[in-house]
Image: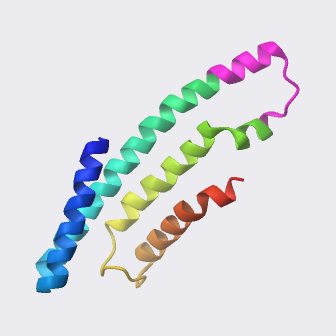
Amino acid sequence: MIVAIVILRIMIAVVRIRFILGGDDALQAMVNHLHIGYFVLIAVLECLSAYFLLTIFASAKTTSLKAAIQTGLFQYLMRSTEVRLALLAILGTMRAITYSFQATAQSATNVASQLDRFAYTMECVFPVIML
């Protein structure tokens, strides 16, 4: 999946260069479709990672309950990498869905594109928020 994501990203860069040099509107539609595939693959990969990490979290939780660790569960949840990745998977899935509804490239002209911008912003500031 990671190789497919890298290939799609390279294809997006190549088609964007051809669009800039030629100015063909059909190439912009191709870039949009490539982005949708790119975001969907990232979202699927994030969801798979989140699933496996949440199973690790569940086993760690049962182990910590057996060991009687006195740390609060909410603090452990917020500090755990597993939950952070699960939240990032939700953001990635939201981005994959909202990007397909954009009418024009790189502009927030309707509700779907504004939600896409919001999802993009949340992905960018995600590391800062989860500190």
Residue at 39%, 83% (x, y): give it.
107
Position of 117 with respect to 59 (left or right) is left
Position of 61 with respect to 73 (left or right) is left
Scheme of colours in the image: rainbow
Residue 74: percent from left, percent from top: 78, 39
Residue at 58%, 25% (x, y): give it.
56
- In front of the other: 15 or 105: 15
- Could you tell me what secondary structure mostly forms the magenta stretch? helix
Using the image, determine if residue 101 lies above or below residue 97: below
| Snapshot quadrant of residue 73 | top right
* Residue 24 seen by the camera: no
Q: Which residues are magenta?
A: 59-73
Residue at 27%, 59% (x, y): give it.
9
Residue 118: percent from left, percent from top: 52, 70
- In front of the other: 11 or 95: 11
Position of 51 with respect to 67 (left or right) is left
Residue at 17%, 70% (x, y): give it.
15
Q: Residue furthest right?
A: 70
Residue 86: percent from left, percent from top: 55, 43
Position of 1 with respect to 14 (left or right) is right
